[in-house]
Amino acid sequence: MLGLLRRTRDMDALVRENRWDERWAIRLGDLTGARVGLIGYGRIARAVATICGKGFGCDVTAYDPLVSPAAMRAEGVEPGGLAAVLASDIVSIHVPLTETTRNLIDTVELGMMKPHAVLVNCSRGGS
């Protein structure tokens, strides 16, 4: 998330090419106060929620039909449906590949996202 928002690759390329002055013209994103949506709320997504929520003051929403809304709220995360998560500034996917999660995000779901939203796929692939 941070690497994409802060355009780490672009900034690195400018520095390596000795184009220092150009870096000031590039608008960088910021995680502070952003709205983060998590698809899946297992161990790794919970760690992401803690870092984003407590570390950066983000509003975190999560979608996971296997985790109770009460458990999410107890950890400071707002439970929501897939549409609510996709309306976030940053969407991070944390689900294993199963028949239920295969093609979970397709063109329809991508179309529900904000035009400049960031999508991070931290899912596990098939075996």
Image (cartoon, grey):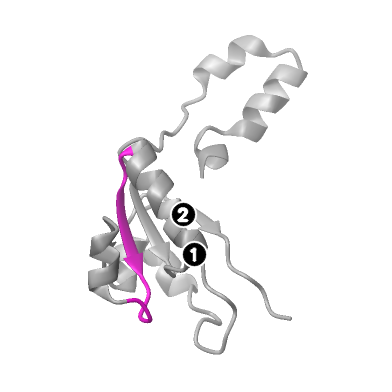
Q: How many marks can you see? A: 2
Judging by the rendered image, the residue that carries numbered circle 2 is 47
Magenta stretch, residue numbers: 57-67
In terms of image quadrants, where is residue 63? bottom left
Residue 118 place in picture, x, y as percent: 47, 50
Density class for disc 1 (Cα within 10 Å; few <14, some 14-19, many ≥20) is few
Relative to residue 7, is residue 39 drawn left or right? left
Residue positioned 56% across, 82% down in the render:
102
Please tell me whether residue 66 belongs to the stretch shown in magenta.
yes
Residue positioned 51% across, 18% down in the render:
25
Mark 2: which amino acid?
Ala
Where 55 falls versus 79 (above or below)? above
Residue 42 place in picture, x, y as percent: 46, 68
In terms of image quadrants, where is residue 10? top right
Residue farthest bottom in this picture: 99
Residue 75 place in picture, x, y as percent: 29, 58
In terms of image quadrants, where is residue 81? bottom left
- Asked whether the viewer can see residue 96, the reply is yes
Can you tell which mark lies on residue 93? none
Secondary structure at numbered mark 2: helix
